[in-house]
Image (cartoon, helix red, strand yellow):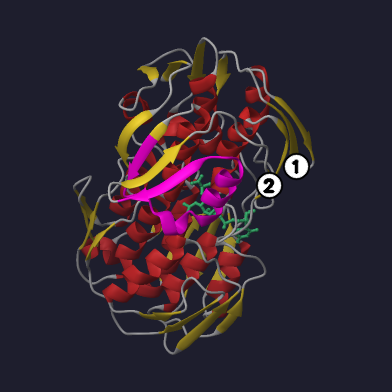
Amino acid sequence: MDKIVIEGGQPLRGEMRVLGAKNAALPIQCAALLADGPTTLRHVPQLSDVRTMNALLAGLGCEVTGERTLTIHPGGVSDGPLEAPYDLVKTMRASVTVMGPLLARYGRARVSLPGGCAIGARPIDQHLRGLEALGATVTLSHGYVDLAAKRLTGAAFVFDLVTVGGTQNVMMAATLARGTTVLENVAREPEVVELALVLNKMGAKIRGAGTPVIEIEGVDRLSGIDHAILPDRIEAGTFMVGAAITGGDVTLRHAPVDDLHAVIAKMEEAGVLFDVTPEGLRVRGPDELRPIDVTTRPHPGFPTDMQAQIMVLATAARGQSLVTETIFENRFMHVPELCRMGADIVVHGNSAAIRGPTRYSGAEVMATDLRASASLILAGLIAKGRTEVRRVYHLDRGYETIETRLRSIGASIERYHGARG
Ligand code: EPZ
């Protein structure tokens, strides 16, 4: 397993490009299953999760070619197994988002239940209830869910809670249903809006994405398209924190500013300086950061995927901060590791009380999940001495060659391949 080693103390300075969004690419890869021809995606991030999704699509019978520019031809799926197997789903839970497309286009799907993950139980009950509302029969056996429907029928459905994947799965299924579907209490994340835009480019008739109600008028077929993946707001936010805590000055090209209002507002409250320039979003760290209170919420609230990262910023601020996680039940796995590096964080239920500023000292730390590992890298950037982050395969799920890109803006950071984990 690889490890990443950082010598802290270098301010981040320079320009870097924000790459394509993992959480936009994954559902759009699934949407390609709905088309009766090939789909080409551009600016695809080179991440292990994207490769896992491509392996799943190939296993379903798709012809998958290319990487940064990716073409998915679902020609062979009708003769395929129509199954998302356990070993792929347990590797990446986003695999369950093939359910809706397979069911809508081929009338059947067999998908392994994802099981829990480091940050929580993450059930898919809302996905299944939504697909049942469209007329699917759903049976659970031996850790798999089997879905079937001759042809889905449009319906009205209200989600019990806001779920990004659930919204995406049911929205995709509804595109080929007979009649109109009205989904309420849906997720409003930019990646949901982007998926609806892609589906409409394919010939779907979707209105309201980005609002609490989405209406889908079913059509008979969808075509393959050519689409560029939008920039990753969470990657951008992660690098914004890096610039802020190192007293740096970084310009992020292609940063999706309109999808980052909650993050920018919270960081401005902490004293971080932002300028939108022709080159991109310029981020400057202040001499001293102010403490902040952050609560994660569904979009347009503060994103849970930035919680671990903003916590590092709060530890660097002078005073008391409070970070509250309302989306996942176990998303403070980074706290013990940050404390080993010197942070003063006390967890009470779903809130973390923080006292700063922290004089971080470098240490050997263990990554546990994607965004937790990003927070350890950030802490390493400002720690005194050497920090070793192990099990960085977690990081590689969502950040493309992060060490190379941080080095390009001044970080002293190296990756060591095959280190003992
Ligand atoms: C997406 O996961 C993202 N992943 C996550 O990003 C992100 O944290 C999450 O949305 C919330 O924004 C992708 O887009 C691939 P949810 P998803 O369904 O769709 C509960 C990252 O770091 N729930 O919105 O799985 C669930 O347990 C990843 O990039 C149910 O109870 O998230 C959670 O507590 C991590 N029943 C909450 O809803 C359901 O049927 C939100 O989950 C579905 C969800």
Callout 1 touching callout 2 (CB < 8 Å): yes
For numbered disc 1, what is the local secondary structure?
strand
Q: Position of residue 160 (x, y in %)?
A: 67, 69
Q: Amino acid at mark 1?
A: Ser
**Which residue range is magenta in the image?**
250-277
Q: Which mark is residue 351?
A: 1
Counting labels gives 2
Where 163 falls versus 15 (above or below)?
A: below
- The residue indicated by pointer 2 is 325
Q: Residue at x 73, y 37 (%)?
A: 352
Q: Is residue 345 visible?
A: yes
Residue 365 falls left or right of residue 16: right
Q: Quadrant of residue 83?
A: bottom left
- Is residue 27 or residue 78 the one in the foreground? 27
177 falls in the magenta region:
no
- Residue 32 drawn at (x, y percent): 30, 63
Res 361 label:
none
